[in-house]
């Protein structure tokens, strides 16, 4: 998996914002002539690469690839853009490596879905690097299923997980943020008038969850299953599809609240907090207790535990 700094959005010639990661995904697609191969090379999903390239084409107002019969090749505009994109990426990598030369460095693992929800962490990581006791933090993008192995074999110094859904023997798990869980019901559902709901209120209904939140709520679902209350869960591609399915099938969605948990209207549905205090989800920093970089890691984790800073750097993205 590739490690690379997450850099602020650049401005294209027409004032259009372009992200460094979009350029990386585009160049990986050029190299492999395939979104699937680009996804493998960058450690993300095929859909994430495809969406990124399509968004880049839309933002730039040009078609970068011709797609015919499951094959793709660069257009003339795409070839010109690829040359310019490669120069930008080379400059960014050279700059980062030059600044990091001789400094302590941590490699932070984030899964593909988490990294997609982050908004410009570059300023915060530079702020930390310049802080007293700070060091450079390099972000690595990994598929969730490989993150534990990457941490335990020493290729990552620490992870940030949107929920701790499996055991990490010999590791510390430090809570960074706690969010109140809730349910989403259709606006015409009788439950929509309630100010709080419990899992018993929706027994027999299907929970509809976007794929991007699969791991976030896994620990909660596992706990319910252990109590014999495990619900039927259906996963869909994205939040818009989840809302549509909730309204069409009278299913129930999962969400969490960044702010105060209160009944909130959303796209013809309502977000309603869970009753009780037990149903919370936590973002965690996980690192090996025997890490030779333990002092640097714990310093960085304490810095992240400032909740306002963490939310600025890594905002949770609920179903809304």
Image: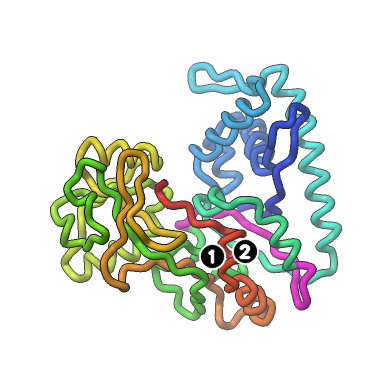
Can you tell which quarter of the image residue 129 is in?
A: bottom right
* Residue range (magenta): 129-145
The residue nearer to you, when weighing 309 against 142, is 309
Magenta span contains residue 308: no
Residue 61 in the image: state x and y as whole percent.
66, 22
Q: What element carries label 2?
A: strand
The residue nearer to you, when weighing 214 against 204, is 204
The reply to whether residue 153 is in sight is no
Number of labels in the image equals 2
Q: Name the residue under label 2.
A: 108
Residue 132 in the image: state x and y as whole percent.
78, 76
Note whether 289 is above or below 10 in the view shown.
below
Q: Residue at x 59, y 53 (%)?
A: 141
Q: Residue at x 50, y 50 (%)?
A: 113
Disc 1 vs disc 2: Cβ atoms closer than 8 Å? yes
Quick check: 30 left or right of 113? right
Q: Name the residue under label 1.
A: 160
Residue 273 in the image: state x and y as whole percent.
31, 60
Q: Which residue is drawn at 53% across and 70% down?
A: 285
Quick check: 52 left or right of 60? left
Q: In the displayed image of the protein, which residue is found farthest to the left? A: 204
Note whether 257 is above or below 92 in the view shown.
below
Residue 75 in the image: state x and y as whole percent.
67, 18
Quick check: 129 left or right of 208? right
- Separation of marks 1 and 2 at Cα, in angstroms: 8 Å
Quick check: 92 left or right of 260? right
How is colour applied across the structure in the image? rainbow
Magenta span contains residue 131: yes
Q: Residue at x 31, y 68 (%)?
A: 279
């Amino acid at each position: 998996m590739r490690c690379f700094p997450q850099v602020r959005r650049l401005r294209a010639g027409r004032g259009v914002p372009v992200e460094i990661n979009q350029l990386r995904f585009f160049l990986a697609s050029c190299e492999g002539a395939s979104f699937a191969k680009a996804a493998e090379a960058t450690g993300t999903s095929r859909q994430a690469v495809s969406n990124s390239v399509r968004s880049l084409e839309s933002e730039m107002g040009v078609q970068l690839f011709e797609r015919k019969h499951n094959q793709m090749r660069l257009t003339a505009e795409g070839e010109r853009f690829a040359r310019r994109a490669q120069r930008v990426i080379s400059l960014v990598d050279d700059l980062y490596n030059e600044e990091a030369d001789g400094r302590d460095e941590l490699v932070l693992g984030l899964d593909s879905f988490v990294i997609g929800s982050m908004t410009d962490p570059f300023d915060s990581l530079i702020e930390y690097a310049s802080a007293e006791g700070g060091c450079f933090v390099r972000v690595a993008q990994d598929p969730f299923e490989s993150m534990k192995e990457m941490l335990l074999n020493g290729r990552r110094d620490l992870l940030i997980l949107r929920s701790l859904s499996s055991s990490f023997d010999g590791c510390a798990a430090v809570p960074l943020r706690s969010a109140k869980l809730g349910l989403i019901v259709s606006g015409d559902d009788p439950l929509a008038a309630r100010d709080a709901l419990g899992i018993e209120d929706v027994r027999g209904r299907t929970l509809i969850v976007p794929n991007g939140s699969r791991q976030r709520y896994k620990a909660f679902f596992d706990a319910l299953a252990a109590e014999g209350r495990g619900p039927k869960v259906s996963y869909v591609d994205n939040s818009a599809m989840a809302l549509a399915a909730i309204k069409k099938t009278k299913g129930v969605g999962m969400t969490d609240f960044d702010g105060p948990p209160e009944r909130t209207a959303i796209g013809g549905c309502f977000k309603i907090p869970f009753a009780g205090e037990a149903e919370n989800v936590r973002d965690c920093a996980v690192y090996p207790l025997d890490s030779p970089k333990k002092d640097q890691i714990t310093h960085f984790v304490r810095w992240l535990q400032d909740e306002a800073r963490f939310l600025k750097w890594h905002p949770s993205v609920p179903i809304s």
